[in-house]
Image: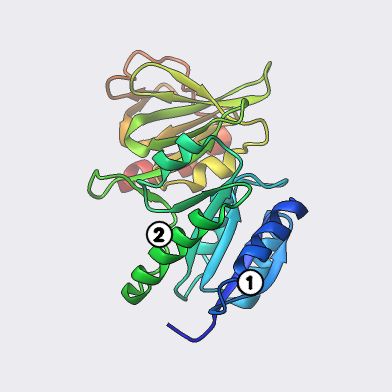
Amino acid sequence: MNDRMKAVIVDDEEAAIDNLCFELKKYPWISVEGVAHNGKSGIRLIEKEHPELLFLDVELPDMLGMDVAIKVREIQNWDMHIIFYTAYNKYLIDALRSYAFDFLLKPVDSEELSKALGRLREADGMKNPTSLLVTNGHEGEKSFMVVTPMGDLRILRVSEIGYFRYVSDRKIWEVALTNGSFIPLKRNTRAENLCAYDAAFVQIHQSYIINMNYLLMVQGGQCVMYPPFNEVDELQVSKKYRKEMMERFCQL
């Protein structure tokens, strides 16, 4: 590890930033190189500074912290550790720590920060590139984090998802799960955000995105899916998306 580890903070709450910066002054081996207040400026700052440590708010004004992390992966060619921090329930944070990322609860507690930085120093010798999708104990399978309209966080595995649909009267996207349930997603969720989570997610219509791993065939302009989605009859392929979807299908 270098004498000073470069850090960047991406958060829209000034009080939370001030509190974190105050706590980080206790660690002379960390140097805060910059602060950004939204996702877009955060990505620019990260690209400029190439920090080794990123403190990233889960929910930003223009995008989710996870979306920032995914976009950073596209430009990242250096080692960087991510610590998410959020005002969500402490018990949820403890559960999320069992995944690939570290999480802190706002306002940042001195003892919890010390533990997180201790884990960071222990792991620093590994020099692995940042993993931006959660590993979950299912070897080779990826997961990601979504936020519901009520502000709840959910970790979903790609294999749990059959498709996404846009509910126009509520102006939200929903995700259809293998257990038959639907989870509504936060209002500012966009189709491109959902498709970016995994290459298996392909848009087939303005209102539908399917998991290609469940696609059996396309018949009469309709997607026929493997169980448990084999009785779904709403997945129509529109002309706009048909060519790309069929090209992806042929690549499977």
For image coordinates 42% across by 17% down, the residue present is 181
Residue assigned mark 2: 131
Q: Is residue 18 left or right of residue 174?
A: right
Q: Secondary structure at mark 1?
A: loop
Instruction: Tell me where residue 235 appears, x and y as whole percent.
Output: 46, 22
For image coordinates 25% across by 45% down, the residue present is 137
Q: Quadrant of residue 138?
A: top left
- In this rendering, does residue 242 appear at all? no
Counting other residues with Cα less than 10 Å from the Cα at mark 1, is it few (<14), some (14-19), or many (20 or more)?
few
- The correct choice, above or below, for 167 with respect to 26 in the image is above
Instruction: Tell me where residue 84 appears, x and y as whole percent.
Output: 53, 53
The three-letter code of the residue at mark 1 reads Lys
For image coordinates 48% across by 62% down, the residue present is 114
Instruction: Tell me where residue 249 appears, x and y as whole percent.
Output: 35, 41
Foreground disc of the pair 1, 2: 1
Residue assigned mark 1: 25
Q: Earlier in the sequence, mark 1 or mark 2?
A: 1
The three-letter code of the residue at mark 2 reads Ser
Q: Secondary structure at mark 2?
A: loop
Q: Quadrant of residue 161?
A: top left
Instruction: Specify the quadrant that holds the C terminus.
Output: top left
Q: Nearer the viewer, residue 244 or 125?
A: 125
Q: Is residue 26 left or right of residue 129?
A: right
Instruction: Tell me where residue 234 appears, x and y as whole percent.
Output: 47, 17
Q: Going by the picture, which residue comes out furthest to the bottom?
A: 3
Coloration of the structure image: rainbow
Instruction: Specify the quadrant that holds the N terminus.
Output: bottom left
